[in-house]
Image (cartoon, grey):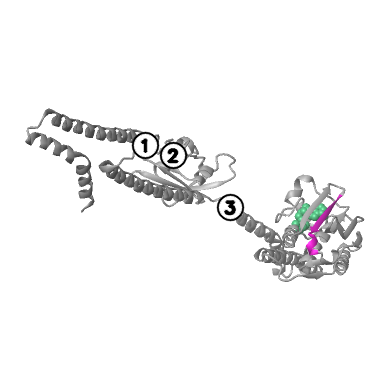
């Protein structure tokens, strides 16, 4: 029997059929009044039973969250059972949809680009988390708000009204103006629009650093090249310069060429350091011998104008000898170049509170506090003329910083104008195996 048949059979057997039988019997037999009364009572009881079930079902339908689902036997049991089965299926379906929606929202919030959906009148319908950081839009607070009322950057409303598909709108972060975003508008359906914002701060910064760097290098090369070209013009006319002048010009040209070569060497060193994360090889560097080499080079550069004092009280240092020599050599050369004749320079390698410290102290011109944080920037110089006159490229401390970073060391600078400076490089204890 089909399920519908079984339900009908149960309904007839348990309720209607016996009463109908009784009524039929009373009618055929022209029976007494009590038989009619019993049949009528039967109908009334049946009606009450159904009415009770109906009331219970209606009450539950009115407030399903407050009431328990009604239960019953017989025909109603079958109906309610089916209804509860349907409800369970519906609930399961809804839970699945909600779970999908939840994970979709999670995925949209994880997208680093800001996403906002607006309708034809530019009212915000939906946005993801990044849109909060980029454009200051936060749901549910801003749901239904016209986006131009929140993003008030000049030109934004006009761009939104007629977006240019080829070039995005550029927006500076409203709060600190430190970040830069681009906004593209994509049509969504008939009237809605999807706004996609992208954080381009880092890309712009890299771009601006690149162009500043190219400008700096060009400028640095231009000066010596101009000097060399000037002298060459003299040489083109043989009669103008005599032998002595010729020699002097050749010397000056050679100085300028050497300067260009030093600059190119420093640039190549920097680019090599930037290209690799770590030194190619490492060894236990004998610091006594490295300091002796630095002293010899320093004395040659100073040419007797300074007193050099070298102390080695620390263990061997694990690292790349060539790179360490380059970093320490730059610090020693700076000390000599920025210390007037008669000054003192102390070079030391020693242990201080468990770390290995290489320091160069001079009694030179010193650096004012406001310049200290920028000294390791490429081409940053306190006194451009003095740096050039002493053969500086403006890249020395940038090279030092890179090398120290690759050796997990930190650089600290103490300085006072007119009193001198101390540059310290501190190396972690694991780079000093012999100290343990
Ligand atoms: P430069 O080739 O110009 O010396 P550096 O990168 O080595 O470039 O140094 C950057 C700037 O830091 C220098 O131009 C100078 O102004 C300052 N500086 C570096 N070392 C010293 C020092 N020992 N005493 C005073 N100023 C220094």
The percent position of residue 118, horizontal first and vertical second, equals 40, 42
Q: Quadrant of the C terminus?
A: bottom right
Q: Quadrant of ligand 1?
A: bottom right
The percent position of residue 150, horizontal first and vertical second, equals 48, 36
Q: Residue at x 72, y 58 (%)?
A: 398
Q: CA distance from mark 2 to mark 3?
A: 26 Å
Q: Quadrant of the N terminus?
A: bottom left
Viewer-nearest residue: 13 or 380: 13
Q: Is residue 189 visible?
A: no
Q: Secondary structure at mark 2?
A: helix
Which badge, 2 or 1, is on the more N-terminal residue? 1
The mark closer to the camera, 1 or 3, is 1
Q: Residue at x 26, y 34 (%)?
A: 49
Report the residue marked by disc 1.
64
Q: Which residues are magenta?
A: 420-431
> Mark 1–mark 3 contact, CB under 8 Å?
no
- Residue 202 numbered tag: 3
Which badge, 2 or 3, is on the more N-terminal residue? 2
Q: Is residue 127 magenta?
A: no
Report the residue marked by disc 2.
157
């Amino acid at each position: 029997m089909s399920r519908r048949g079984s339900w009908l059979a149960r309904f007839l057997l348990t309720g209607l059929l016996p009463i109908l039988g009784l009524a039929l019997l009373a009618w055929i037999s022209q029976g007494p009044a009590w038989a009619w009364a019993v049949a009528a009572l039967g109908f009334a009881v049946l009606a009450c039973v159904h009415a009770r079930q109906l009331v219970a079902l209606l009450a539950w339908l009115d407030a399903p969250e407050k009431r328990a689902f009604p239960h019953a036997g017989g025909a109603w049991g079958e109906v309610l059972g089916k209804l509860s089965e349907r409800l369970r299926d519906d609930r399961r379906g809804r839970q699945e949809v909600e779970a999908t929606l939840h994970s979709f929202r999670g995925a949209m919030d994880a997208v680093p680009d800001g996403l906002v959906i607006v309708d034809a009148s530019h009212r915000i319908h939906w946005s993801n988390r990044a849109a909060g950081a980029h454009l200051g839009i936060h749901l549910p607070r801003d749901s239904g708000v016209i986006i131009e009322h929140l993003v008030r950057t000049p030109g934004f409303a006009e761009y939104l009204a007629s977006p240019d598909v080829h070039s995005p709108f550029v927006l500076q972060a409203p709060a600190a103006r430190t970040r830069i975003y681009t906004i593209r508008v994509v049509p969504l359906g008939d009237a809605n629009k999807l706004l996609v914002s992208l954080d381009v701060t880092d890309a712009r910064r890299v771009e601006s650093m690149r162009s500043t760097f190219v400008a700096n290098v060009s400028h640095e090369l231009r000066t010596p090249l101009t000097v060399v070209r000037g002298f060459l013009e003299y040489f083109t006319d043989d009669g103008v310069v005599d032998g002595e002048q010729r020699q002097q010009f050749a010397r000056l040209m050679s100085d300028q060429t050497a300067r260009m070569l030093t600059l190119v060497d420093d640039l190549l060193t920097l680019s090599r350091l930037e290209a690799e994360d770590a030194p190619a090889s490492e060894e236990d560097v004998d610091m006594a011998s490295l300091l002796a080499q630095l002293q010899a080079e320093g004395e040659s550069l100073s040419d007797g104008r300074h007193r050099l004092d070298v102390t080695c009280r620390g263990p061997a240092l694990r690292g790349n000898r060539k790179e360490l020599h380059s970093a320490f050599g730059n610090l020693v050369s700076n000390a000599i170049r920025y210390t007037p004749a008669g000054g003192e320079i102390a070079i030391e390698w020693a242990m201080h509170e468990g770390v290995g410290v290489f320091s160069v102290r001079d009694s030179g011109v010193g650096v004012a506090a406001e310049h200290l944080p920028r000294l390791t920037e490429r081409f940053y110089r306190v006194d451009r003329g003095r740096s050039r006159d002493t053969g500086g490229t403006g890249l020395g401390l940038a090279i030092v910083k890179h090398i120290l970073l690759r050796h997990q060391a930190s650089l600290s600078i103490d300085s006072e104008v007119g009193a001198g400076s101390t540059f310290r490089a501190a190396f972690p204890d694991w780079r000093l195996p012999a100290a343990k």
